[in-house]
Image: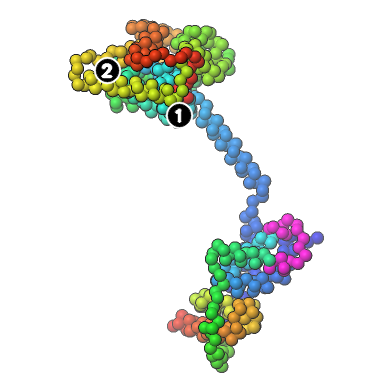
Amino acid sequence: METANERFEKIFLETNEKISKFVLFRVAQTKDAEDIVQEVYLRFYQRVLCKGKEIADPLSYLFEMSRNELKEYYRFKKNAPVLFQDQELNLLENIPDDSDVELEAINRYTIDEIWQAVTNLDAMDQKILGGKFRFDMTFKEISESTGWSENSIKTRYYRALAQLRKCLKEEEA
Amino acid sequence: MSNMKMAFERNLLNPQTTMDHIQRRSMKRRPKWLWATSLVATLVLAAIAYGVYQVPTTFISVDINPSIVLSTNLFDRIIHVETLNEDAQLLLANLNLKGMTAEKAVEVLAEEADKMGYIDLLAEEDAILVTLYAPSADSEAKLQRLTERIQTRFEERKFAINVMTQGVTAESKELATQFDVSLGKILFVDKLVEKFPELGSADQLYNLPVREIMSLVHATEGLPVMNQAQLEQKKQEMIQKEEQIKNQEQNGNGQPNNQQNKNSDVNAVQTQDQTKDQTQLQTQDQTKAQDQTCTPDQDQDQTQDQTRDQLSKPDTSGGTGTNGNGS
């Protein structure tokens, strides 16, 4: 018979990625996303599993808990997801051909240096890069999560990479 | 895996970080029974502390003309105030002595008595008699300290006050054991019976609660029933009258100090420190000193008459007396 801890670990591994992606694009800062995800799973563990409650569909249950947690977040922290005016990024800029070069340049730096530079980026840039590199989301998926157009997401993404490389160069200097 | 990806994997919504957080928070949870136990323990300690605070350890009788008995706790704070005559009730109107230190309470009483004309604190021959009753032989040192504190407070103000400590006699100890009550209570009841012989035998009173004993005292003395407003009003009138008299004296109208204001039943008695196992001789000494002018019973009647004359008020209705404010 499974213990509560074993059940939790199993459910956590199965649902963590989806819940994290769901929350990431609905908060203002990436740090807030971490806090909310931790709080959701903590409550799930304490109030459901530790009390021996049976949940038929843990993923749906966790999504519901996440929505509730986000409502509280919006209410008390007065933080709504940043609503970019998509018209601002309506310019169909040419996707630079050297995007892979940017990434290659960035990868020469250490993990800590890269992350330090990432924390200095705009919150939305962090989330887009996070969606790509942490959760391997496509531009389309990120577009659906944020409500922006795919073009806007791409533009923002490449601008973020350029900014990141610039920051790392400046740090190195 | 590129460094870029690893940077995000490690630092953004890392599953291991989330698990660690949950484990830490889960371990911090205290079982419910521990909360309940803590709450019960807190309540019990609070009740014990309250009980200890309320236990009287020393009785202090203050005799001016108003006679008042103060009970203090372990911390020398006033917890009960009992009045032994009508003047005491008036004196304590709108006064709250509870929580005060013993020496502060005696000082406040002296000031109020002065304002109301019961004593002239600047006259050397008058005095306030303060008697401290030791509940046990062990508290003699404490009594001594309390005596010194009271004397010091009044020395600084140049008031004439005599402080006596009533030590524990062998007979008192035996009575305390026999009746299974504190020594302080034995001494307190003995004083009451000495002051109010109508109460009867002290043996019948030792086991009664103090409040019940005081009710008997008030009933015996026929203290009038007055509500708080009446007491305060009467007190205010006495204070105003006393101020008028003092103003007249200051203006040099040629009238001598008003002897009627003085408490002639309390005389300057030499300050004595009573030691253990003294016999009834000390009681006789007190009586002798007081007999230099008049007896306690005569004193009481005399003073009450004087007070009534000053006020020129009709007699209030008789009945069971009630404690003044602060009891």
Chain letter behind tag 1:
B
Q: Quadrant of residue B299?
A: top left
Q: Which residue is mark 1?
A: B98
Question: Is residue B5 visible to us here?
Answer: no
Numbered label attached to residue A87: none
Residue closer to the observer: B320 or A2: B320
Decide which of B106, A153 is in the foreground and name it: A153
Same chain for mark 1 and mark 2? The answer is yes
Q: CA distance from mark 1 to mark 2?
A: 29 Å
Q: Which residues are magenta?
A: A46-63
Q: Which residue is mark 2?
A: B123
Horizontally, residue A108 falls left or right of residue B67, namely: right
Q: Position of residue B63 (x, y in %)?
A: 39, 17
Dot 2 falls on a residue whose secondary structure is loop
Please tell me which residue is depicted at 34% across the width and 16% down the height of the picture: B311
A173 over B244 or under it: above or below: below
> Tag 1: residue type?
Lys
